[in-house]
Image (tube, coloured by chain):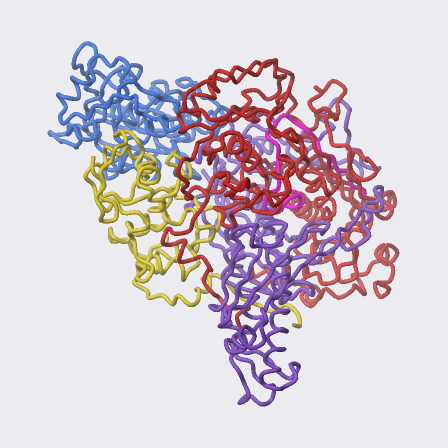
C-alpha cells in the first residue's frame, strides 16, 4: 500500500529536522497508531513519511520545576505524572496503544474522523505548555495555543511546562477504551494561584476555557461560563447537546478537585 | 453530584428452532474398522460449540468414549444438509439428527455383536466402548472388535443416518394468525434481575450485577451453556446501554465505523453475572435439551430499563439508554413533562414517540375506548 | 460413563489456543486475486451511468462484475417460505442504501483493486430518502421501494402480520386501567471479530470451491446456486468454522459475488471486508417501533393487548417478514393474555437492510413487553414479580396463535430469581406452579376465555 | 529489515510503514494474529514485540526491525501447551476463537510483567480487546488462574464461578 511512499527514519533530532524540511507533502509518524490505520484504509497515501521512532526524541527531563517531554515519549510514560497530565494520559485508549502512541503524535493529531482526537491537548493547555517545533522558519518556540493551529504543518520536537501547584482532571467514564476522549476537562493552578482550564472533545482540537477561568471562583458559574468558550459538535459518541450539558459538570468537578488539593 | 442505584427485573420466553419449523438437519456416521466413529454434519460452529455438543450426543448415544468420535462439518461434499446455525437450532434440531444417526449405528453394532456373541441384540447394551450382555457383564465384546468383525467378517459397513424435520407450520388464517401445527417445539424461559447505578449529572449508567435464571432443558455441556448465557448477557448489556448503529435515529448521521465509535461492550463494562441453570427437560430435544443461545441477550434490556426507573424515576423506552437519554429524561422529569397523560382509565406514556405524533395520519395507533 | 452433561472442553479448543484453527482468511491459495467493491455513496439514487471499461483496462485487473454478469439477479433468500425476491445482488438502475454494492473488481492486490474501483465511472441522480418508519405510510412520504413503502406479501397477500384472539373490545371495556407506551430498541451491529470474508477457487473440473464464513453452509450454497443458475454439484462450500456470526453471517454477503469474479477471471478470488465495511455496509439488527396498550384490572390481570409494530427493514425485505412473524407469535411474552389485536408491518427505509440477529424478532418484543409489564406494576402500585407470576403462562394456556403451552417454566424461573435476589414472596406466589390455574388465579375472564384447560 | 518471529529470523521486503500484521500474515504466512479491524480497535492482532504486547495492525514493521516477535504460534506447542493456553481450554475462554490469540498474548504479557489474579487489573490490561462471544468472564478467570499458577485438567472445563445448577422438573 505504501510502496510509493518515500520513507525516512532519522537517527537523531537533527536528521529529523533536516528530513522534515518545510513539511511539504511529508507525513510524520510518531508511534504509528494514527497514521498506519489511515494508510490501511487508503485515506492517507503520503508521498513522503518521516518515522521518528529512532530519532532519539523521547524522554522526560526535569530542570527545577520545568518539565520537558520529547516528541516521541510514549503516552504511557506520562501516566505517573501528577494531574492533570497523569490521569489524562491514563485515560487514552488502552495499555497497548498508550505504550505505542507518542506525545507528539497525540498533540499533532488532526481532527478525528468520527470522534475527537488529541486527548492530551487539553491537559497541556491547562498546564500552559510551550512547544518547540521545526519547520518552514526553522526551530521556533511558542505556546501550545499558538502552535495548535499549525500542528499539521510543523514538526513538534518537545513540549514543556512548569509543574503546577495543583492539577485536576475530569473525563467522561467511557464505556470503552478503544477510542479518543469523548469529553474531558483539565485544570491546573500555578503557584501564584492562577487557574487555567481546558477541554478536550468540545471542538476540533483542545480548547482553552478563558471564560471559565475568569469565573472560576464560583464553580457553578465557571462551569456555565465554559460554554462560551467552546463550539460543541455532534459525532458518533456524543451530541453537541450532551457535551453542552456535561461540560459545566466536568468544569465544576475539576474546580472542586483543584480546591480540595489546596 | 449524585449516584443512584436501582434494581429491575424481566422474565422472558423464546422458541427453539425456526419459528415455523420446516428446517431440516441431517447427519451421517460411519464406523471405522477399529470402532472409531466419524460424524459428518453440516452445522457450522460459530463459536456456539456445536461441534462439541454433537460429538457428545453421538458418543453418549452409541456408548463409546468421547475421544473415539471425530466430527466433520467442513464441507458440503461430505456433510449432509443442515439449514444452519441460527434460531437456536444447532443443539435442538441438528443435535437431534446426530442423535438419530447414532441410534442407527448402535442398532447395527448390536446386530453384529449379537451374531458374534450369539445373543439376541435386544439383550445387549453398549457401555464405554464395550458391548455387554445385560445381566451377564462377563459376556462382552469391545466395539472395536465388533467393528472389525463387521468389516472383515461380515463384509458390512456400519453407518447411520439421521434426519430431523418438523413440518412447516402454516398460517391457516391470515386474519387471526392461527397455525395448523405447533410452530416451535420447545420454548425456553429465563428471568433476569439487574442492579445498576446512574450518575445523574453525566447520565452514565453502569451495570453492577445481573442475576439470571435459565431453564435450559438439559445442559449437554454445562460450561458451554454458561458461555452462551454470559456472552449473551454482555450483548444484552450492549443493547441496553451502549450499542447503536444510528446514534441519531431515525437520522443516519454519524454512524460509527470503528470499535471506538460503535460501542460494543468491553471488558471494563462487565458486571458480576450470576447464573442459575434449571434443567427442566424438553420432550423434543436431544436428551431434553433446549436452545438457549439466542434468548441469552433478551432479558437484560428490559431489566435495565426497569432498574433505571427504580434509580431515578424515569422510564426510558428507547434503546440504548445512553447518557444523553438519561439527562433528557431527567430534564423532562424536572419540567414535569415526564408523567404519563391520565384521562379516565387511560394512562398514556411516550406520546411524543408515538406514530400519532409523527405521522401525518397515514398510520395511527388507536386504543379502543 | 456419562458424556452428556459432562463439562468436556471444546472440540476445537486446542486449535483455537495454538492459532491452528483455519478461518477463511487463513486459507492460502497461490495466485489469489483480491476484491474491492464499488458501493453506493447515496442513500437513494437512480444510477444514470455505469461504465467499467477504464477499470477493466488496467493492468493487473482480471475481472470486473456488475449486475449484467449475474445470471439470476434477484433471488429471495426465503423464497421457500413465500417471501418473494426484491433485492438485486448488484444494484441495477437504482441504489436504495448507502454502501449498496454496484460493481466489484478482482485484481492482483487490494491496492490495485481499490484503484480500479475508483476508475469505474458511475453517475447518480439522487432521490428522496425515507428514514422514519412512522412516516412511511403518509401520503407525502417518498416512495422508496418498487412495491410501496411496506411489505405486502403475507398470507393471502395481506400487507401486515395480524393476530386476533378473543374479544379485544370486551377487554378494553372491562379494564380498570389502560396502560399505553412506545418502545424503540436500536439497530445494532453483529460485530463479529471476523469480518465477512470469502475465498473462491475455480477447480479444473469446472466446480467452484467456496471457502465461506457462513453460519449456514447449505443455505449459502443454495443462494449461490440460484444466482448462478447451476446445480448444487457444481459447488463445494468449505466452512463450518466461523469467527463469530450472531445472525449476520446467515446473509450470503460475499459468496456469490466472489464466485462470479472467480468464474470470470478463472483465478482464485478473495474478498475480506474491512471493519468499516462491516460496520457501515453489513446488515444490522433492525430498529423496531412498538406501541402497546394493555387493558388491565386494578389487581394486575392483563385482560387484553392491542399492539402495533413497525419493523424497520431497511432497503429490502431479506428475512424481515420471517422476523416479524416470529415477533407476532411472541408478543404476549411469557404471559397468557386472552384478548389480542396485533398488527405488524415490515416497513422499508433507506437504511442498510436489516437481518437476523441473536433473538431475531423476539429481542425487540421482550424489551417492549417486559418494560411495559414493569410500568403496569408501577402504575397499579403492585409488586413487579407478583404481577408477572399472576399472568405467567401455564400448562394448557394458549399462545397468541392458538398453540397450547405444554411445559412452560415462567413460574419457576421467576420464583428462582425472586429467591436468588432475596425478594420475599407471599406464600401463594411461593408455592405456585405451572400446573393449570385454579382458585384466585383462575379469574372469571380466564375461565370464560380459556375454557377448561382439561379439555386440551 | 529483519524480523525474528517465534525464534526464526526472516528477511523482510515490505516497506517500513507496512503494518506488522500484514507482514506476518501476507509476507510470512504466519496467520495466528487475526485481522479484525486494521484500526487498533479489537485487539485480535496483538503480538509480543520484545515481550511487550502491541497491536500488530498499528505497528509499522520498520519499528519492529530487529525485534523478537512472538505470535500465538510461539506460545506453546501442541504437546507442550503453555499454562495460559491450558487455562483458556480449561476455563472455556475461547468460543469462536477469533479474538483468542490476541487475548492470550495480552494475558501472557500481563503475567510476565508480574500481574496477579486481581480481576480489575486484568480488565485494565486486556481492556482494549473485544470478544463478542464469551462476555469476558471466562477469559478473566483463565488469566487469573494462570497468574495464580493453577494447574489445569484438560479433560474437563471449570464450573463457572457464579453458576448454580438446579433441576426443574421430573426427568
Quadrant of the image for the C terminus of chain B? top right
* Residue C125 falls in image quadrant: top right
Shade representing chain B: purple
Q: Residue at x 26, y 31 (%)?
A: A31
Is residue B303 in view?
Answer: yes
Residue C22 lies, in percent from the top left, at: 43, 48
Compared to residue C367, the image places residue C149 above or below, namely above
Residue depicted at x 12% and y 21%: A14
Q: Nearer the viewer, residue B300 or A226?
A: B300
As drawn, the chain in blue is A
Q: Is residue C363 magenta?
A: yes
In the figure, the shade used to draw chain D is yellow
Residue at image position (51%, 28%) is: B255
Q: Colour of chain C?
A: red
Location of residue A102 with respect to C449 vertically, above or below: above
Answer with the quarter of the image where residue B119 lies: bottom right
Residue C119, image x, y percentages: 47, 17
* Span of residues in magenta: C341-365
Quadrant containing the N terminus of chain B is top left
The image quarter containing residue C71 is top right
Q: Is residue C356 magenta?
A: yes
Q: Report the number of numbered marks.
A: 0
Amino acid at each position: 500500500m505504501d510502496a510509493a511512499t518515500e520513507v525516512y527514519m532519522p537517527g537523531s533530532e537533527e536528521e529529523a529536522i533536516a528530513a522534515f524540511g518545510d513539511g511539504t507533502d511529508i507525513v510524520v509518524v510518531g508511534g504509528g497508531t494514527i497514521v498506519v490505520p489511515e494508510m490501511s484504509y487508503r485515506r492517507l497515501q503520503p508521498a513522503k513519511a518521516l518515522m521518528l521512532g529512532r530519532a532519539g526524541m523521547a524522554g522526560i527531563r526535569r530542570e527545577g520545576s520545568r518539565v520537558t517531554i520529547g516528541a516521541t515519549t510514549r503516552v504511557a510514560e506520562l501516566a505517573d505524572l501528577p494531574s492533570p497530565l497523569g490521569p489524562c494520559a491514563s485515560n487514552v485508549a488502552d495499555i497497548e496503544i498508550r505504550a505505542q502512541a507518542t506525545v507528539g503524535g497525540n498533540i499533532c493529531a488532526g481532527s478525528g474522523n468520527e470522534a475527537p482526537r488529541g486527548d492530551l491537548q487539553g491537559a497541556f493547555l491547562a498546564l500552559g505548555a510551550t512547544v518547540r517545533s521545526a519547520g518552514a522558519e526553522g526551530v521556533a518556540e511558542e505556546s501550545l495555543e499558538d502552535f495548535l493551529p499549525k500542528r499539521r504543518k510543523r514538526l513538534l520536537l518537545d513540549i514543556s511546562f512548569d509543574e503546577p501547584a495543583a492539577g485536576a482532571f475530569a473525563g467522561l467514564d467511557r464505556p470503552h477504551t478503544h477510542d479518543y476522549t469523548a469529553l474531558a476537562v483539565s485544570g491546573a493552578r500555578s503557584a501564584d494561584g492562577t487557574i487555567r482550564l481546558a477541554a478536550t472533545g468540545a471542538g476540533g482540537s483542545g480548547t482553552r476555557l478563558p471564560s471559565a477561568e475568569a469565573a472560576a471562583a464560583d464553580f457553578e458559574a465557571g462551569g456555565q461560563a465554559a460554554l462560551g468558550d467552546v463550539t460543541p459538535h455532534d459525532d458518533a459518541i456524543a451530541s453537541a447537546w450532551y457535551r453542552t450539558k456535561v461540560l459545566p459538570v466536568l468544569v465544576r468537578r475539576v474546580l472542586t478537585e483543584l480546591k480540595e488539593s489546596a | 453530584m449524585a449516584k443512584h442505584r436501582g434494581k429491575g427485573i424481566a422474565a422472558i420466553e423464546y422458541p427453539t428452532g425456526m419459528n415455523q419449523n420446516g428446517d431440516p438437519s441431517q447427519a451421517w456416521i460411519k464406523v471405522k474398522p477399529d470402532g472409531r466413529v466419524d460424524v459428518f454434519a453440516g452445522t457450522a460452529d460459530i463459536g456456539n460449540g456445536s461441534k462439541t455438543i454433537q460429538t457428545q450426543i453421538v458418543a453418549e448415544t452409541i456408548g463409546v468414549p468421547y475421544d473415539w468420535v471425530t466430527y466433520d462439518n467442513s464441507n458440503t461434499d461430505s456433510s449432509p444438509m443442515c439449514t444452519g446455525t441460527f434460531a437456536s437450532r444447532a443443539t435442538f434440531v441438528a443435535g437431534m439428527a446426530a442423535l438419530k444417526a447414532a441410534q442407527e449405528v448402535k442398532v447395527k453394532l448390536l446386530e453384529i455383536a449379537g451374531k458374534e456373541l450369539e445373543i439376541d441384540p435386544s439383550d445387549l447394551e453398549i457401555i464405554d466402548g464395550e458391548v455387554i450382555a445385560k445381566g451377564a457383564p462377563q459376556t462382552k465384546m469391545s466395539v472395536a472388535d465388533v467393528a472389525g468383525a463387521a468389516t472383515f467378517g461380515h463384509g458390512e459397513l456400519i453407518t447411520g443416518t439421521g434426519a430431523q424435520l418438523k413440518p412447516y407450520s402454516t398460517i391457516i388464517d391470515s386474519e387471526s394468525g392461527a397455525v395448523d401445527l405447533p410452530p416451535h417445539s420447545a420454548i425456553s424461559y429465563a428471568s433476569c434481575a439487574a442492579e445498576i447505578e446512574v450518575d445523574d449529572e453525566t447520565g452514565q449508567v453502569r451495570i453492577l450485577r445481573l442475576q439470571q435464571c435459565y431453564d435450559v432443558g438439559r445442559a449437554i455441556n454445562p460450561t458451554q451453556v454458561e458461555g452462551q448465557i454470559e456472552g449473551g448477557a454482555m450483548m444484552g448489556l450492549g443493547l441496553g446501554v451502549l450499542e447503536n448503529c444510528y446514534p441519531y435515529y431515525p437520522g443516519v448521521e454519524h454512524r460509527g465505523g470503528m470499535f471506538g465509535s460503535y460501542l460494543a461492550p468491553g471488558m471494563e463494562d462487565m458486571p458480576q453475572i450470576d447464573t442459575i441453570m434449571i434443567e427442566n427437560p424438553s420432550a423434543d430435544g436431544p436428551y431434553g435439551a433446549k436452545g438457549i443461545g439466542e434468548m441469552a441477550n433478551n432479558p437484560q434490556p428490559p431489566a435495565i430499563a426497569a432498574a433505571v426507573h427504580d434509580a431515578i424515576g424515569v422510564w426510558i423506552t428507547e434503546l440504548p439508554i445512553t447518557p444523553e437519554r438519561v439527562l433528557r429524561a431527567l430534564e423532562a422529569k424536572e419540567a414535569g413533562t415526564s408523567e404519563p397523560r391520565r384521562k379516565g382509565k387511560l394512562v398514556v406514556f411516550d406520546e411524543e414517540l408515538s406514530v400519532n405524533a409523527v405521522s401525518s395520519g397515514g398510520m395511527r395507533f388507536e386504543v379502543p375506548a | 460413563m456419562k458424556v452428556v452433561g459432562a463439562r468436556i472442553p471444546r472440540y476445537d479448543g486446542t486449535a483455537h489456543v495454538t492459532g491452528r484453527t483455519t478461518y477463511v482468511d487463513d486459507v492460502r491459495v497461490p495466485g489469489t486475486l483480491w476484491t474491492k467493491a464499488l458501493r453506493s455513496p447515496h442513500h437513494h439514487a437512480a444510477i444514470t451511468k455505469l461504465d467499467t471499461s477504464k477499470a477493466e483496462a488496467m493492468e493487473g485487473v482480471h475481472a470486473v462484475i456488475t449486475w449484467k454478469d449475474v445470471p439470476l439477479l434477484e433471488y429471495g433468500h426465503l423464497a421457500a417460505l413465500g417471501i418473494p425476491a426484491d433485492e438485486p445482488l448488484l444494484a441495477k438502475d437504482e441504489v436504495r442504501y448507502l454502501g449498496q454494492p454496484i460493481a466489484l473488481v478482482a485484481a492482483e492486490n487490494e491496492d490495485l483493486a481499490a484503484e480500479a474501483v475508483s476508475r469505474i465511472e458511475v453517475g447518480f441522480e439522487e432521490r428522496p430518502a425515507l428514514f422514519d418508519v412512522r412516516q412511511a405510510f403518509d401520503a407525502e412520504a417518498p416512495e422508496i421501494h418498487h412495491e410501496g413503502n411496506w411489505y405486502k406479501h403475507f398470507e393471502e397477500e395481506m400487507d401486515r402480520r395480524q393476530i386476533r384472539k378473543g374479544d379485544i373490545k370486551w377487554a378494553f371495556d372491562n379494564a380498570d386501567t389502560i396502560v399505553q407506551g412506545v418502545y424503540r430498541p436500536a439497530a445494532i451491529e453483529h460485530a463479529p471479530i471476523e469480518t465477512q470474508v470469502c475465498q473462491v477457487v475455480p477447480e479444473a473440473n469446472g466446480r467452484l470451491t467456496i471457502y465461506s464464513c457462513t453460519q449456514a453452509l447449505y443455505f449459502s450454497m443454495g443462494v449461490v446456486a440460484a444466482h448462478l443458475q447451476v446445480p448444487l454439484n457444481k459447488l463445494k462450500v468449505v466452512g463450518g468454522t466461523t469467527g463469530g456470526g450472531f445472525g449476520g453471517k446467515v446473509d450470503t454477503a460475499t459468496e456469490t459475488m466472489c464466485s462470479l469474479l472467480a468464474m470470470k477471471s478463472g483465478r482464485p478470488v478473495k474478498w475480506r471486508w474491512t471493519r468499516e465495511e462491516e460496520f457501515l455496509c453489513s446488515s444490522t439488527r433492525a430498529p423496531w417501533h412498538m406501541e402497546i396498550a394493555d387493558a388491565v384490572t386494578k389487581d394486575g390481570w392483563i385482560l387484553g393487548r392491542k399492539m402495533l409494530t413497525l419493523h424497520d427493514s431497511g432497503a429490502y425485505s431479506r428475512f424481515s417478514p420471517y422476523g416479524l412473524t416470529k415477533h407476532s407469535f411472541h408478543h404476549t411474552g411469557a404471559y397468557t393474555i386472552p384478548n389480542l389485536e396485533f398488527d405488524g408491518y415490515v416497513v422499508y427505509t433507506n437504511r442498510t437492510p436489516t437481518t437476523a440477529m441473536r433473538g431475531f424478532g423476539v429481542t425487540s418484543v421482550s424489551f417492549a413487553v417486559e418494560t411495559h409489564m414493569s410500568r403496569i406494576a408501577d402504575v397499579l402500585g403492585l409488586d413487579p414479580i407478583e404481577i408477572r407470576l399472576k399472568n405467567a403462562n401455564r400448562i394448557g394456556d394458549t399462545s397468541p396463535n392458538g398453540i397450547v403451552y405444554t411445559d412452560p417454566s415462567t413460574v419457576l424461573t421467576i420464583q428462582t430469581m425472586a429467591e436468588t435476589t432475596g425478594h420475599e414472596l407471599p406464600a401463594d406466589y411461593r408455592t405456585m406452579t405451572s400446573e393449570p390455574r385454579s382458585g384466585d388465579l383462575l379469574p372469571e375472564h380466564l375461565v370464560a376465555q380459556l375454557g377448561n384447560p382439561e379439555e386440551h | 529489515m529483519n524480523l525474528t518471529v517465534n525464534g526464526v529470523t526472516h528477511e523482510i521486503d515490505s516497506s517500513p510503514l507496512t503494518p506488522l500484521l500484514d507482514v506476518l500474515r501476507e509476507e510470512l504466512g504466519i496467520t495466528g494474529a487475526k485481522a479484525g479491524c486494521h484500526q487498533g480497535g479489537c485487539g485480535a492482532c496483538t503480538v509480543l514485540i520484545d515481550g511487550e504486547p502491541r497491536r500488530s495492525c498499528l505497528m509499522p514493521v520498520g519499528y519492529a526491525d530487529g525485534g523478537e516477535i512472538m505470535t500465538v504460534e510461539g506460545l506453546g506447542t501442541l504437546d507442550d501447551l503453555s499454562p495460559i493456553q491450558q487455562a483458556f481450554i480449561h476455563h472455556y475462554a475461547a468460543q469462536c476463537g477469533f479474538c483468542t490469540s490476541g487475548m492470550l498474548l495480552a494475558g501472557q504479557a500481563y503475567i510476565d510483567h508480574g500481574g496477579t489474579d486481581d480481576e480489575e487489573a486484568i480488565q485494565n490490561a486486556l481492556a482494549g480487546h473485544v470478544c463478542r462471544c464469551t462476555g469476558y468472564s471466562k477469559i478473566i478467570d483463565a488469566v487469573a488462574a494462570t497468574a495464580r499458577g493453577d494447574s489445569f485438567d484438560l479433560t474437563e472445563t471449570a464450573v463457572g464461578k457464579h453458576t448454580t445448577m438446579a433441576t426443574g422438573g421430573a426427568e
